[in-house]
């Protein structure tokens, strides 16, 4: 997670313990370790994006992020 450098964002709540608890409590078998990590990382990124929309971004930045997500979704649609 350090390589993401999320702790450098002044507006974001980076709460790895809170984000690791749900996957750890529901996917506790050892062979699910990669799934736990993916779920926790997704939780952290959702929290950061939520904070980005709440306090950290200008209107233009939010519109750019939404456009990027829509572009990604459309390029990966079934």
Image (spheres, rainbow, N blue to C red):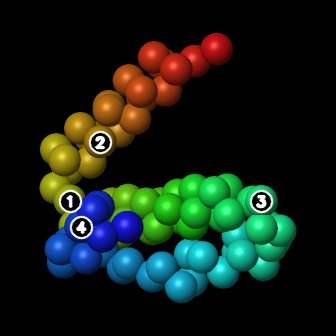
Q: Are marks 4 and 3 in contact (CB under 8 Å)?
A: no
Q: Are marks 1 and 2 in contact (CB under 8 Å)?
A: yes
Question: Label 1, label 4: how many angstroms apart (C-alpha)?
Answer: 17 Å
Q: For this view, does 42 lie left or right of residue 35? A: left
Between residue 39 and residue 11, name the one nearer to us: 39
Image quarter of residue 22: bottom right
Q: Where is residue 53? Give x, y as percent.
A: 33, 60
Residue named by callout 1: 57
Mark 3, secondary structure of its residue? helix
Q: Which residue: 77% across, 59% down?
A: 31
Question: Label 4, label 3: how many angstroms apart (C-alpha)?
Answer: 28 Å
Marking on residue 47: none
Q: For this view, does 33 lie left or right of residue 7? A: right
Question: Label 1, label 3: how many angstroms apart (C-alpha)?
Answer: 39 Å
If the image is split into quadrants, where does the C terminus sit?
A: top right
- The answer to whether residue 55 is seen in the rendering is no
Nearest to N terminus: mark 1 or mark 4: 4
Q: Nearer the viewer, mark 1 or mark 4?
A: 4
Placement of 28 over or under 33, stated as above or below: below
């Amino acid at each position: 997670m350090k390589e993401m450098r999320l702790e450098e964002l002044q507006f974001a709540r980076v709460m790895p313990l809170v984000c690791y608890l749900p996957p750890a409590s529901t996917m506790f078998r050892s062979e699910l370790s990669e799934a736990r990590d993916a779920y926790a990382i997704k939780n952290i990124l959702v929290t950061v994006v939520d904070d980005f929309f709440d306090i950290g971004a200008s209107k233009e930045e939010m519109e750019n992020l939404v456009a990027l997500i829509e572009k990604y979704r459309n390029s990966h649609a079934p």
